Image (cartoon, helix red, strand yellow):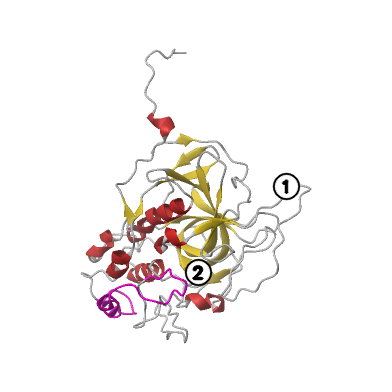
Amino acid sequence: MVNTRIQKHAHSPGDGNASKAKAAKTDVSQDVAGNSKPEPDGQSSPLSTATDSTCPSNSASHENLTAPAETVDGARNRTAHGGFSDDKKNPYEGILRVLIPVPRIRDLLKAKDIADPVPTFNLIRYYRNNRAVIKRVLLLAFAPSKTNLMNLALSDPTECSVSSDKIVHGLPYAQSFFLIGSVVYSDLFGGDTTKQICMRPLDFSFSRVTAVVGRVFGTAPGGTLFFNGYRGGMSFMSWMKPESGRMSQTVPPHAVNGKRHVVRPWDEPVPVFDCRAGFKLSQYHLAPKCFENPEEGDLVFIICTVGWYKNMSYNVASFNVQVVLKIADGPTSMDGGKLTCALPAYFGELHGFGVSGEELPATDAIDEMEADEDEMMY
């Protein structure tokens, strides 16, 4: 892995939060069945049973299915209780087929003055013997977008734009997106700190996340997009704690109701919900509320906005956290131990979906400089 030195920007999060001791895990059932019926408005949960919609829709209504009918019918044959109905058939084939490929760009994690590729999380490697966790994470990772909450990995960048340094989608305010990953650091309740959670995003979808965000920000194909990082993870922050003598960001009080999401001020805790049991995305706020930080290794579903730093020689994506859902405990030694049964072949088809072009080396111009034979030795 090659390090690339870059200029530190004033808005880079840095070491703004104090470390916290890991809290004991609460005893919550890990039932992943959901057993829920579709909502009257047609918004079905990705964890529901036979009525799952596996086809994304990024139009204004987000209700029309874009995959052929037979693909949808095939997806409905999936079982709801562990495992997969047909290990040979990819239940997400319809989604992958209708996605418009986005030119691949390079991702780098911006932490202090060193940049490395964004560390990602290999779900299959760490949960190879836990089919229940793999299944529900994949269902969430391919959940369809709604007007108030879009799946960033499945979004169409041509339908998004930038307004006031935030990505918007047809409306004047910042669009809420979601990403899934494994926690490396979390301080969402600290009394005198900017709230922050850092995670490693899912490896099979992050290439498209980078490509989508980079395309909206105008990053050229093959170019580089930086992501704010801390503690070796991708950083999601509340509004920053102001410098001494400056006014804090004013945010009107807003109840968490699953319909609208806001970025919290630095001195307010970020809403965290325990969604390890079945839940609907539109009703996550009905799940038990957490009052302790997710632990390192836990899988989380982060609702956020996406902004950027402009007027710089490179683009930096800045993610502001709105809500955090804990969807699974960190992997056990048994989860990631010796494989007990064969995994579906289509798992390999999911990696790097929805992008065009070959994988880019993690280098920058400074690393590609030719050696100077006349350089003096000191």
Report which residue position mark 1 lands on.
243
Q: Is residue 139 magenta?
A: no
Residue 252: percent from left, percent from top: 70, 67
Report which residue position mark 2 lands on.
149
| Location of the N terminus (image quadrant) | top left
Between residues 47 and 123, which one lies in front from this camera angle?
47
Can residue 172 be seen from the camera position used here? Answer: yes
Q: Is residue 284 left or right of residue 345?
A: right
Can residue 228 be seen from the camera position used here? Answer: no
Residue 11, compared with residue 88, is above or below; it is above
Q: Residues within 10 Å of mark 1 (few under 14, many from 20)?
A: few
Residue 332: percent from left, percent from top: 40, 62
Main SS of the magenta part reads loop
- Residue drawn at (44%, 74%) of the image: 62
Between residues 296 and 263, which one lies in front from this camera angle?
263
Which residue in the rendered view is the most extreme toward the right? 245
Q: Amino acid at mark 2?
A: Leu
**Sequence order check: which comes first, mark 1 or mark 2?**
2
Q: Is residue 69 magenta?
A: yes
- Residue 33 badge: none
Q: Amino acid at mark 1?
A: Glu
For mark 2, give the secondary structure.
Answer: loop
Residue 337: percent from left, percent from top: 32, 59
Which range is magenta?
Answer: 56-85
Q: State the image quarter where residue 68 is shown.
A: bottom left
- Residue drawn at (63%, 51%) of the image: 17
